[in-house]
Amino acid sequence: MTPITQTITPATPDTDSEHVRHDWALAEILALFDTPLNDLLFEAQCVHRRHFDPNTIQVSSLLSIKTGACPEDCGYCPQSAHHHTQLERERLLSLDEVLVAAKQAQEQGATRFCMGAAWRNPSDTNLERVVPMIEAVKALGMETCVTLGMLTESQAARLKQAGLDYYNHNLDTSPEFYGTIISTRTYEDRLVTLQHVRDAGIHVCAGGILGMGETRNDRGALLQQLANLPSHPESVPINNLVQVEGTPLQGVEALDPIEFVRSIAVARILMPRAYVRLSAGRLDMSDELQAMCFFAGANSIFYGERLLTTDNPEVNRDRGLLKRLGLRFAPAVSESQPGQ
């Protein structure tokens, strides 16, 4: 019998081919989660191909520019001053230290450089110390992203003036489960910061953490919150909990890997034009699991051996995996980003 062959031509981004919704009901989202896996992956891949080249991966690198002693009590975080972990408190890095790290990330293929500081909310003085870092990284030709905690309207405007491309502020989980994980700030606090960032004209990076003991309903409700924002986040990082000794979530039951894949696929269907990023937790993922996530619509990774305070796969391992899968690094400029 002669085998049937078909040539698949990579899709080009198309921002007009389907209506983007912001009115998803939780029941609709849970129905997607309940879809047979093959059907769910097929739908997610079709959506993905309508908006992105399916064989490119956007690559970001993440650096902790100020580590530890955070006043928040997030149950997953080793940087919280409320938890007894082995993490050492570190001062805010110098501009030179940040530039060295950014140049190294760029040489390794990263196109976006993200800087995180363990603050509840930055003082204006702190913000002014971060602004030169943003300007210097931007001058290298990289996209810039920072995560500094809650922002005021004027602080968001200042970051925009500095040339910031993205601001990361995760919702973490569902509104219903949120109080189980964090008590020192409210869900509404997070939504207000996202609105300040959007109003300032900065791209939004917002996602969450899976595997914290939440239910499928919580995972669906998290994605509902993100998808029903007035504009979808341009980047949606999906983290798989990295359990750290000394944090309240150490010992929680690990999430089923197939459920993680389902979550990626549902995120892709709900937010078709967003970059869905495999974030923390990749070190513990098999190559096969990551490949399934890419097929489900993930098209961005954090790259480099360290993510704030947790380990990440080595650069050579990531390069080898992408080569085996026939995937390429996305272009280094933001014009490849589909519009909302």
Image (spheres, rainbow, N blue to C red):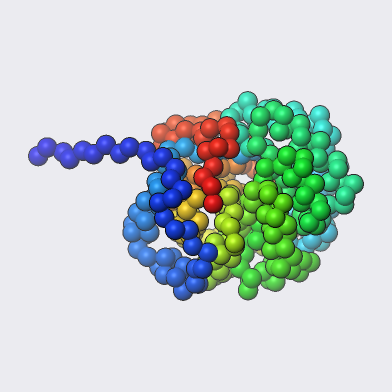
**Residue positioned most to the top:** 107
Residue 126 seen anywhere in this rendered image of the structure: yes
Residue 264, image x, y percentages: 49, 55
**Nearer the observer, 271 or 29:** 271
Does residue 312 sit above or below 36 in this rendering? above
Does residue 166 sit above or below 263 in this rendering? above
Q: Residue at x 70, y 71 (%)?
A: 179
Q: Residue at x 76, y 31 (%)?
A: 136
**Residue positioned most to the left:** 1
**Residue positioned most to the right:** 125
- Tell me how many marks there are: 0
124 relative to 114 in the view: left or right? right
Figure quadrant of the N terminus: top left
Does residue 46 sit above or below 114 in this rendering? below
Q: Residue at x 87, y 52 (%)?
A: 123
322 relative to 174 in the view: left or right? left
Q: Residue at x 69, y 63 (%)?
A: 191
**Nearer the observer, 107 or 324:** 107
Which picture quadrant has residue 262? Answer: bottom left
Which picture quadrant has residue 72? Answer: bottom right
Residue 112, image x, y percentages: 63, 37
Residue 238, image x, y percentages: 57, 53
316 relative to 92 in the view: left or right? left
Residue 255, image x, y percentages: 53, 60
